[in-house]
Amino acid sequence: MRDLILIALTGLGLGALYYLVAAGLSLIFGLMDVLNFAHGAFLAAGAYGTWWATGHLPGGGTQGWGFVLSVVFGVALGAILGALTELTLIRPLYARPIRQVLVTVGLSLAATALLRAVAGADPLRFPKPGWTARTTRVVGATVPNDRLLLIGAAVTVFAALSLFLRTTRYGLIVRAGVQDRAMVTALGIDVRRAFTLVFAIGGGAAALAGALGGVYFESINPAQGGSLLIFAFIVVVIGRMGSVTGTAVAAVAVGLVQQFANFYAASGLGDLSVVLLLAAVLLTRRATLTGSLA
């Protein structure tokens, strides 16, 4: 029973990490039809920004509010990078989807190469708060605190994103844009600011995933964003593109399937199980891949 609880909470922690990466990716495609392969660069910006801030930012550090300030710095860096990407690279190419893909793939490769040149290709040890290395007893199971941190962060982001989409003016524009962007534009509503805002939100969420992923994996490397982005795309497809709730449910399912398969089948079969889950969903789904924000 204790093993079952530990595996379930570890799977939920991993699913929470996938959700933080996939939430912005889903919104960006749902509203703007942009397959953003540069999303991993936002994650890397958050991871390396937080890593740098813990040792160099005044007030930053690995303990207490110092770590919170470091994470905020990393998240702000990812959000700014997301907004700049939309303004300078994506906005001129909204009518050219093939060029969007090429530009975002190029940006992803350039960001990875830049990180390797500046910080080196070897993994860097991530400075983490001491309490995240300790454990908490949950129904008899000894659970590492970093799993609980990821779950708490994902629940907070999900609640904040749902509140933003349902109660704010820009949230309503985003929801309407996902359903029918042509109609929103025809009503005279300027959706360009909403586009930039969605990119900034997506970049910030991915950057948070990068910072907390560093705590979970205890290291960061230039290719980490790309490897997590693969699972984020799977989550977005399973949860229906543009659906915040669907993305959350899919992230939980992917994290649990991966962990239970690794434990009860064989180590390494978790990734294969996730691919089989994706295939099963695509084969049984009758509707299109696109969805809603419900």
Image (tube, rainbow, N blue to C red):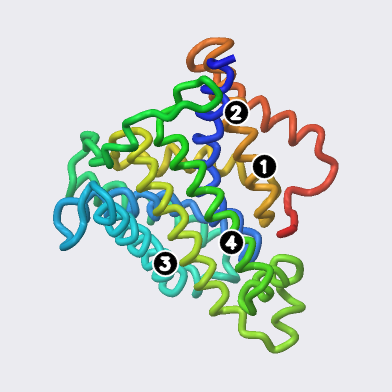
The earlier-in-sequence mark between 4 and 2 is 4
Which residue does the numbered mark 2 point to in the structure image? 256
Q: Is residue 289 left or right of residue 121?
A: right
The earlier-in-sequence mark between 1 and 3 is 3
Q: Which mark is residue 249?
A: 1
Corner quadrant of residue 66: bottom left
Residue shown at 74%/84% (left/top)? 186
User: What's under tag 1, amino acid-wise?
Assistant: Val
Q: Residue 272, percent across and down? A: 58, 22
Which residue does the numbered mark 4 point to in the structure image? 161
**Label 1–label 3 contact, CB within 8 A:** no
Most extreme residue toward the top, as rendered?
Answer: 265
The earlier-in-sequence mark between 2 and 3 is 3
Q: Is residue 181 above or below residue 218?
A: below
Residue shown at 64%/61% (left/top)? 162
Residue shown at 60%/71% (left/top)? 95
The earlier-in-sequence mark between 2 and 1 is 1
**Label 3–label 4 contact, CB within 8 A:** no
Q: Residue 124, percent across and down? A: 22, 37
The earlier-in-sequence mark between 4 and 1 is 4
Query: Which class describes the residues within 10 Å of circle 1: few (<14), some (14-19), or many (20+)?
Result: some
**Label 4–label 1 contact, CB within 8 A:** no
| Secondary element at image label 4 | helix
User: What's under tag 2, amino acid-wise?
Assistant: Leu
Query: Which class describes the residues within 10 Å of circle 3: few (<14), some (14-19), or many (20+)?
Result: many
Q: Is residue 251 left or right of residue 127?
A: right
Which residue does the numbered mark 3 point to in the structure image? 85
| Secondary element at image label 1 | helix
Q: CA distance from mark 1 to mark 3?
A: 28 Å
Please identify, in this view, whether the residue under mark 2 or under mark 3 is nearer the observer: 2
Q: Which mark is residue 273?
A: none
Q: Residue 88, percent across and down? A: 41, 73
